Amino acid sequence: MNYAVKNYTMEREFPLRKETIWKLLSDNNRLNLYIGLFPVAFSEAKKEGNGVFFREGRAKIANTVPLHWREYPFQWEENRAYSVERRYIGGPLHYYLWGVELFEAKDGSPNKTGVRIKASFKARNALGAAAIPLIGLQSMKNSMKYLEEYLASGADDPFNAPQKSPNHKVQLDELERLEAALRKRPVKEEYVALLHDYLIEKSSQDVAHIEPALLANLWHADLDEVLRLLLYATKEGMLNLSWNLICPNCRISKSEQNSLSDITEQFHCDLCGINYDANFDQYVELQFSVHPAVRKAYAEVYCVGGPMITPHVKMQKIVGIGETVLLNIPESLESLRVRVVQANDQVRFETGEMQKGRDSLVYSDGGWSFASIGNPSEVEITNSSSNDIVIVLEQDSWNAEKVTAAKVTAMQEFHDLFSSEVLSPGKKIGIDRVTILFTDLKGSTSLYESVGDAAAYGQVRRHFEFLTQHIAKNSGSVVKTIGDAVMAVFHLPEDGLKAALEIQQNLAGFNDGANEDIVLKIGLYSGPAIAVNSNDRLDYFGRTVNIAARIEGQAEGGDIVFSSDYMEQANLRKLLDANGMQLEAFTANLKGIEGRVELMRLTTAAPAIKTVG
């Protein structure tokens, strides 16, 4: 029997901004769980003939009726609409098309939004015809109910949207025991209470994949403070940590490892079809999960391609062979690009004020007609290639709030708590940008001669503790000591400069009462580096490290020296201007570096420091 296509539409207005509704309804993994759909197992991306890629999905209705389908890429325009198509391989259905559209409220209020949910079903047999009203229509009703319950809850963040009553069991006695130990750590009491509630109340998915930046936003808290809390909670056995390998194009996790030692130098993205080198800056992300001793949690999959899985993508469209589509470009403070998924051919938009007008792009088997265009309000795209393609309009820059391996491994707490977390011997992972700080004592030989070996050694050891305190306070960590010198690492250049300033400005207080004052030389440099396993600890090598050491050698004592290009970042210039710092420009020959290097010497406004020797 040939069953007719059934089309359904539901419409309502809600007193919510479109951005809020978009976040709620386009987070399909969370939405599908709420509306009662079933978890799904997806294959890697596949492609046949000249068509676009798809994934095969498998699931069971009520754990009994098996479903097997091809799921094609979601199509969406951020804050406006999305749709997804499934074509079934056997079973009770032929195909299913689901879509959500947001439209302006009748009274034109920006605080009201119209929601239209559309669905098309085609049954294959009597079971499918009977299931459509029971499951399909109910899913549409439940989606509207999801928005109603969000409104009724008074939540101020879509992440706090209502969820099904938890069916998990929390081991409260064990949780409270671990919290008592956590409170003895240098963490804020209010954060411990917030983490307690989170682990009890949130869904299995939420506690199985805990993102530090998400918690910081949710709690309106400082990211570094939240990260420290999670690191200490992991050390106490409340949480586990994992490292996610992120594809640099689609920016989706492709692999999850429990230890840095398990990370490989290359990994593969099935969606993009390319191998990538692991990179601490962007491609290795830290996440946490609740420890099974506290609560058993499983991150079941309900969706792998929804808009909120790739929030940097503003628009995604399927463009058939010979088809032309028009993209309405949103105004953005971020730089944008158009990319062909899997082929990864890109066109970048120039930054600056948007220009009203339309540009045209043609995509052929040889790539795009232009490598870059201006910043138009519309772009007409024609697919003249021999394949259907999927194009995305996306932010070119990465999310700075993600906690990457480069950030967390630069923190002193990480080195202190997880000293065994190192790369496997022989492996090396690149870092695009890291800040290296070197310090050394001026006249240390005279210090030993003046006060004796025992007293001098004790003062040098205390000075290491003094340095570590200020380095850790500014989100850095001591990598190693080399004689009387210290090598430290920072994720952000401004953190390195803040630490250097605090060290020099507080050195007089450290020297107070000492038999002989110590004088410090400090050098800073930022650039790419290689992270490696050296003597069972995480270490850094490369030109950046060598230059930082050579720059420190140009310091005279009581000063901070760095390269002139170190000051190119606005945050650093503001930091110096705010503190009234004096800079002296000079050039020097650095051993192993060709030509003279332009350097800057900063003398702090601290009290005068006596020199030694």
Image (cartoon, rainbow, N blue to C red):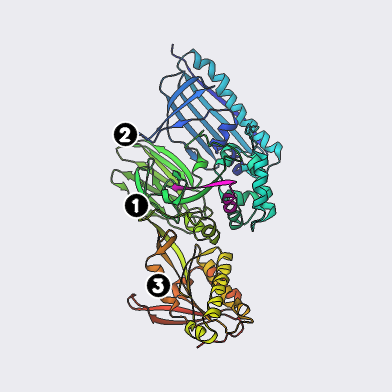
Q: Is residue 198 left or right of residue 371?
A: right
| Image vertical order of residue 37 relative to residue 374, above or below | above
Which tag is nearer the camera, tag 2 or tag 3?
3
What is the spatial separation of the Cα atoms under label 2 and label 3, in whole angstroms? 52 Å
Within 10 Å of disc 2 (Cα), the crowding (few <14, some 14-19, many 20+) is: few
Q: Which mark is residue 547?
A: 3
Which tag is nearer the camera, tag 1 or tag 3?
3
- Note whether residue 84 is visible: yes
Assess whether mark 1 and mark 2 are in contact (beta carbons under 8 angstroms).
Answer: no
What is the spatial separation of the Cα atoms under label 1 and label 3, in whole angstroms? 39 Å
- Say what amino acid the circle numbered 1 marks: Phe
- Say what amino acid the circle numbered 3 marks: Ile
Taking depth in this image into account, of 346 and 328 the one nearest to the observer is 346
* Among numbered discs 1 and 3, the one appearing first in the sequence: 1
* Among numbered discs 2 and 3, the one appearing first in the sequence: 2
In magenta stretch: residue 232 = yes
Q: Which mark is residue 370?
A: 1
Give the image location of residue 315, x and y in percent: 47, 43
Give the image location of residue 94, x and y in percent: 44, 21
Residue 197: name its quadrant.
Answer: top right
Q: Is residue 266 left or right of residue 376?
A: left
Extreme-bottom residue of the structure: 613
* Among numbered discs 2 and 1, the one appearing first in the sequence: 2
Residue 205: name its quadrant.
Answer: top right
Q: Which mark is residue 50?
A: 2
**Where are the magenta residues, as a range?**
230-245
Extreme-top residue of the structure: 1
Which tag is nearer the camera, tag 2 or tag 1?
2
